[in-house]
Amino acid sequence: MISPLKIAWAQITFQRLRLLAALLGVAFAVILVFVQLGFQRALYDSSVRWHTALGYDIALISPKATYIVNPPGFPRNRVYQALGVAGIASVTPVYIGIAEWRNPQDPLQARNIYVMGFDPSDRGFALAGDERQIARLRMPDRVLFDRLSRPEFGPVANQLISGRTVTTEINNRDAEVVGLYELGTSFGIDGSIVTSDLNFRRIFPDRSASRVELGLLNIEPGADLKVVQEAVRSALPGDVRVLTRAEFIQHEVDYWSNSTPIGYVFGMGVAMGLAVGLIIVYQILFSDVQDHLKEYATLKAMGYSQGFLSRIVLNEAVLLALVGFVPGLLLSLLVYTQASTATNLPVEMTPIRVALVLALTVGMCAFSGLLALRKLRAADPAELF
């Protein structure tokens, strides 16, 4: 008996233009799905860069805080109250604000920049580099700059690496960049700087020193994280939330996925990509069945079952999915590379995403094949005579 797979391959390769149209349709759907999933994941990964880079086990935030870009404050003494709880080894009060940064190369250009302030003697800032770099922040009007910030903030990293002194204005106050760290941008942060708590209050003179936006707690070695978290929660009043690192990260992801339209938009983009591919593949398969109804009827007259003919169409659908997936994947890799370079966002291809999109593509084409089977039932051997 002839293999349904061989017949399916002969069918889809017989008309080259139709095959090309089908492959372009599948590849377009694959690219659209990859781009939507890639940017959605980049949104979530970039939004929690600070959460993962800071050194802590438990975080304190305001109950009104929605995301880390510009959260409301809470009393700083809550952080030091937590230090008295059994199992807490150290604490770091953190100030967060948005300041106006002037491009040091072109002072006429000004952009908002994300600012974090902390006591350089605290251990919460692993991202700020070695002790010598952090010690420089003890001097007035000194900051560290994220070398992965958007280029609109100026060639700060290149100037520092070349040995030049970099000075600029932050909230109309002169400041010097004395070091670099690497973190990157997000959908809410184009660039960032880190400084001491004293320098933070110089940049924001109207801000009260008694209110902070974030508290970082480190537990003692061997202490049970959940037990210490509950102890801190019991010791503090309700004007702070006590979250583990994992809960703090999930809190941020939930905000972007549920409280903003961005997560919905990306999900809709995936659905639209699959819908476009489904329609194109269905039209191709329907036309193919329509053009070969007599051949299918002949096979029925020869004794081949309806199931055998259905497997031919479904094999065509799967072959179109596999062949169209390859160029879609290759073009998606190119789009990811360009997007990552242009935005500094973590747009990366992962094996899990490749497997997911491949499964979605095969499912999309298989469903198109099932829809096309309705026309195949019209193949009647009696019409041949």
Image: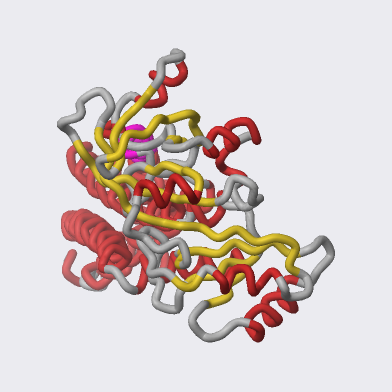
Q: Is 88 left or right of 297, judged from the image as shown? A: right
**Residue at x 42% of width, y 46% of height:** 6
Magenta span: 330-343
Please provide percent x and percent y for residue 332: 35, 40
Give 357 or 258, whichever is nearer the viewer.
258
Please provide percent x and percent y for residue 180: 49, 31
Give 55 or 265, whichever is nearer the viewer.
55
As drawn, 363 above or below 138: below
Q: Is 93 left or right of 324, judged from the image as shown? A: right
Q: Main secondary structure of the magenta part?
A: helix
Please provide percent x and percent y for residue 366: 36, 62
380 is within the stretch colored magenta: no
Give 293 or 303, whichever is nearer the viewer.
293
334 is within the stretch colored magenta: yes
Query: Does the image show residue 368?
Result: no
Quarter of the rendering occupied by the C terminus: bottom left
Give 379 or 141, whichever is nearer the viewer.
141
List the single residue furthest toward the right: 222
